[in-house]
Image (cartoon, grey):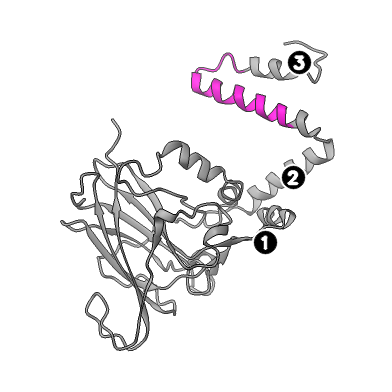
Amino acid sequence: MSIDLTEETITAEVQKTFDGAADERTREIFVSLVQHLHDFAREVRLTSEEWFTAVDFLERVGRISSPTRQEFVLLSDILGVSVLVDQINHDGGAGSATDSTLLGPFYVDGRPRVENGSDISGGVPGMPLFFTGRVVDSTGLPVSGADVDTWHSDGEGFYDVQQADKLHGELAMRALLHTDLDGWFSFRSIVPRYYPVPTDGPCGEIIRAAGRSPMRPEHLHFRFRAAGCEPLVTMLFRGDDPYLEQDAVFGAKRSLVADFADHEAGETAPDGTPMTEPFQTVEWTFTLASARR
């Protein structure tokens, strides 16, 4: 290793230290990372104070992160990296496949498994929502037995994990379902609402420094896994949401805009329940791409 390195020579010297990597992909990634990181520092003439500020920022991102708050995921989201990686790895709903988008920071393992038609609201108050979905493959045939994860916020824009004390640690507005023999699944819950991404942590500092909106449009999350099909992570958005075109994490897509249909009290819900209050319904068909060989 050389000594007396300069601004011009240090990059190549650091890159050489990865020549012995056992995995070629590891070497490729780190050599490129070093190149771009060093070029960035040279381009903006990064000061020592600015670099230590950045290191401190990342340390605070790590400290605030937890199993129910993924600040690093949020950081990736607000910088557009999550959507970029998704676009690199998915061909934008190739053919008839449903477009993918972000998993987001509020996905939780260990969600309850429920039967189709179940109320997944967890008793959280709000306008009733009835969702009916179908999962098909790229040829239009139904996909039976598919795992369907779903989760969403409440009518004030909060997820269950953001109000653990209020809900006594219980999960709500999320569940794992399975499609029936004809590919159908359904559930009852409450209508979600647009909301700001968490701004009380380090990521909020970036949003405020940039003077940008922290808002996400109203949406429902879905994650699908089925034999013979590519996994799919996606969302459905309300078309008339005021924040549809200024999503703080760049995840909204026109192809994923659904009709959140309004119904008056006195009408019958899709499950046959006579409703004594206004409610909404959403219907959607999700198409999964064939598994890559």
| Mark-to-mark CA distance, 1 and 3 | 41 Å
Image x and y of residue 151, in percent: 41, 62
Image x and y of residue 289, in percent: 29, 42
Question: Do labels 1 and 3 touch, CB within 8 Å?
Answer: no
Question: In terms of sequence position, does the residue under pointer 1 or pointer 3 come before the other?
Answer: 3
Q: Residue at x 27, y 39 (%)?
A: 290
- Which numbered marker is on residue 131? none
> Which amino acid type corresponds to the residue marked 1 in the rendered image?
Asp
Q: Residue at x 31, y 56 (%)?
A: 148
The magenta stretch is 18-40
Q: Which residue is mark 1?
A: 200
Q: Which residue is mark 2?
A: 56
Question: In terms of sequence position, does the residue under pointer 3 or pointer 2 come before the other?
Answer: 3
Q: Is residue 92 visible?
A: yes
Residue 197 higher or lower than 233, as above or below: below
- SS at mark 2? helix
Q: Quadrant of the C terminus?
A: top left
Residue 189 higher or lower than 248, as above or below: below
Image x and y of residue 10, in percent: 75, 18
Question: In terms of sequence position, does the residue under pointer 1 or pointer 2 come before the other?
Answer: 2
